[in-house]
């Protein structure tokens, strides 16, 4: 199972550079700071720009308390080549704390699957390798008043436009446009809309690589698609090099040359 795919997926919807100001981070993050989505909400995105068109589906399918007694929801995330995700290439089931949101700090349980494999829970110690290292809790200060143009680091700026009607594959929605520039280069553009469930993300574009993700469908009638494994099933862990078979262990060039000479006739 590729940890990179999961890390990239979550980073796309949640990660923001830690050195940015609070308001700049709010603009960079497409995921709300609090998971307010109701059980049953779902949204499908169409991804264009890679060699093959792809689709991603997010759905809130349940709620319960996490290990610390906080309100949390079960979120399903699927990736595939079909708009209805009938044969997903990868699936993730996450328990997300409502007050933290869909980011590494907020995901307290994670189940993963690839292709036809059964869901397998990721061991708690391995979560940072999939989701990134959680950031320490910081005091929540008052947000500064919004501005049209913000500095986001050396030579980087964020421009926020006024809400306007935007056409998407799911229909026309009212969205607030954002644009991130490095000097004169447009790094990305995205449109945030309260009319789109879960992430409130209507569309995002990366002009330098000609990649885009746009909402395609959404609704409020989601049902669980994934079956959690038994609590007794083996969990996914990340082992050490010592646990690998010898043929998979790293060997220095000197050791490799020595073995080659020993095998000569």
Image: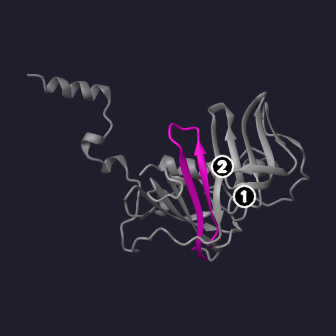
Secondary structure category for the residue under label 2 = strand
Q: Mark 1 Cα within 10 Å, few/some/many (few <14, many 20+)?
A: some
Examine the rendered structure and indicate whether residue 260 appears above or below residue 16: above
Residue nearest the observer in this picture, 224 or 70: 224
Confirm whether residue 132 shows in the render.
no
- Residue mark closest to the camera, 1 vs 2: 2
Confirm whether residue 124 shows in the render.
yes
Residue that numbered label 1 is attached to: 200
Residue that numbered label 2 is attached to: 214
Picture coordinates of residue 226, whole percent (x, y)? 47, 68
**Span shown in magenta:** 40-67
Magenta span dominant secondary structure: strand
Left or right: 200, with 125 as reference point: right
Secondary structure category for the residue under label 1 = loop
Q: Is residue 222 magenta?
A: no
Picture coordinates of residue 191, whole percent (x, y)? 76, 49
Q: CA distance from mark 1 to mark 2?
A: 11 Å
Q: Is residue 59 magenta?
A: yes
Chain-order first, disc 1 or disc 2: 1
Left or right: 142, with 242 as reference point: right
Which image quarter holds the C terminus?
top left
Write down the quadrant of residue 108 in the picture.
Answer: bottom right
Examine the rendered structure and indicate whether residue 5 appears above or below residue 97: above
Picture coordinates of residue 254, whole percent (x, y)? 29, 25
């Amino acid at each position: 199972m590729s940890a990179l795919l999961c890390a990239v997926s979550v980073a796309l919807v949640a990660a923001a550079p830690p050195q940015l100001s609070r308001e700049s981070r709010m603009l960079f993050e497409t995921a709300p700071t609090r998971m307010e989505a109701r059980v049953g909400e779902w949204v499908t995105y169409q991804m264009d720009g890679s060699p093959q068109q792809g689709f991603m589906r997010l759905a809130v399918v349940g709620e319960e308390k996490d290990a610390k007694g906080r309100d949390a929801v079960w979120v399903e995330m699927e990736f595939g080549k079909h708009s209805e995700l009938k044969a997903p290439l990868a699936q993730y089931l996450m328990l997300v704390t409502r007050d933290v949101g869909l980011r590494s700090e907020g995901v307290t349980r994670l189940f993963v699957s690839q292709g036809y494999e059964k869901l397998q829970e990721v061991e708690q110690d391995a979560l940072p390798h999939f989701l990134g290292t959680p950031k320490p809790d910081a005091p929540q200060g008052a947000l500064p008043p919004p501005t049209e143009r913000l500095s986001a680091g050396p030579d980087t700026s964020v421009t926020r436009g006024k809400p306007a009607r935007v056409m998407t594959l799911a229909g026309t929605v009212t969205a607030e446009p954002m644009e991130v520039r490095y000097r004169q280069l447009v790094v990305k553009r995205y449109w945030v809309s309260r009319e789109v469930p879960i992430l409130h993300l209507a569309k995002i574009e990366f002009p330098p690589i000609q990649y885009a993700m746009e909402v395609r469908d959404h609704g409020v009638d989601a049902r669980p698609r994934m079956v959690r494994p038994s609590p007794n099933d083996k969990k996914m862990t990340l082992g050490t090099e010592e646990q690998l078979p010898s043929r998979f262990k790293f060997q220095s060039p000197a050791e490799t040359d020595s073995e080659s000479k020993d095998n000569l006739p």
